[in-house]
Amino acid sequence: MARFQRYRREIASQPPAPNRTRERGTLEALARRLEEQNTAFQSAGKSWLRGDDTRRIRQERATTVLEINLLLARLGEVALIERLERIPFQQKSEELRRFLSTQLD
């Protein structure tokens, strides 16, 4: 709840940039974070990390996807959000990279 309220304050204070450079930068950073979290989650599965660690990584990854969805909604990319909901986490990163390379240029 606190994260959403912070997001709402940030969004209210920043109208969308005409060329979307700020949103693109934020989305690129979130895509990188998701890739890192996917790598950490896969590594956790291969090692013997405690259940708390894997649970924390999974929760952080879900939070990142929520932030991505909020930003995409702000950009009006509802169809992309729907596609992302149906694919595994690793493919979400790949789909975001494709979107960034083709749609926001």
Image (cartoon, rainbow, N blue to C red):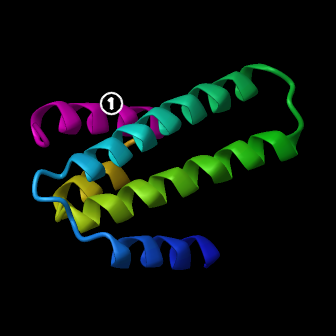
Evaluate whether residue 88 shows in this view. Answer: no
60 horizontally vs 73: left or right: right
The x, y position of residue 20, in whole percent, is 18, 52
Q: Name the secondary structure under disc 1.
A: helix
Q: Nearer the viewer, residue 78 or 1?
A: 1
Q: Quadrant of residue 49?
A: top right
Q: Classify the position of the N terminus by image quarter.
A: bottom right
| Count of numbered circles on the image | 1
Q: Nearer the viewer, residue 82 or 31?
A: 31
Q: Classify the position of the C terminus by image quarter.
A: top left
Tell me the residue at 25%/67% (across/down). 74
The x, y position of residue 60, in whole percent, is 64, 50
38 horizontally vs 83: left or right: right
Q: Quadrant of residue 17?
A: bottom left
Q: Is residue 42 above or below residue 69?
A: above
Q: Main secondary structure of the magenta part?
A: helix
Q: Is residue 89 above or below residue 68?
A: above
Q: Is residue 93 magenta?
A: yes
Q: Is residue 101 magenta?
A: yes
What kind of residue is marked 1?
Glu
Evaluate whether residue 10 shows in this view. Answer: yes
Instruction: Determine which residue is flagged by label 1.
Output: 94
Magenta range is 88-105
Residue neighbourhood size for the residue with mark 1, other residues' Cα within 10 Å, grouped as few (<14), some (14–19), many (≥20): few
Tell me the residue at 50%/38% (across/down). 34
Q: Nearer the viewer, residue 13 or 45?
A: 13
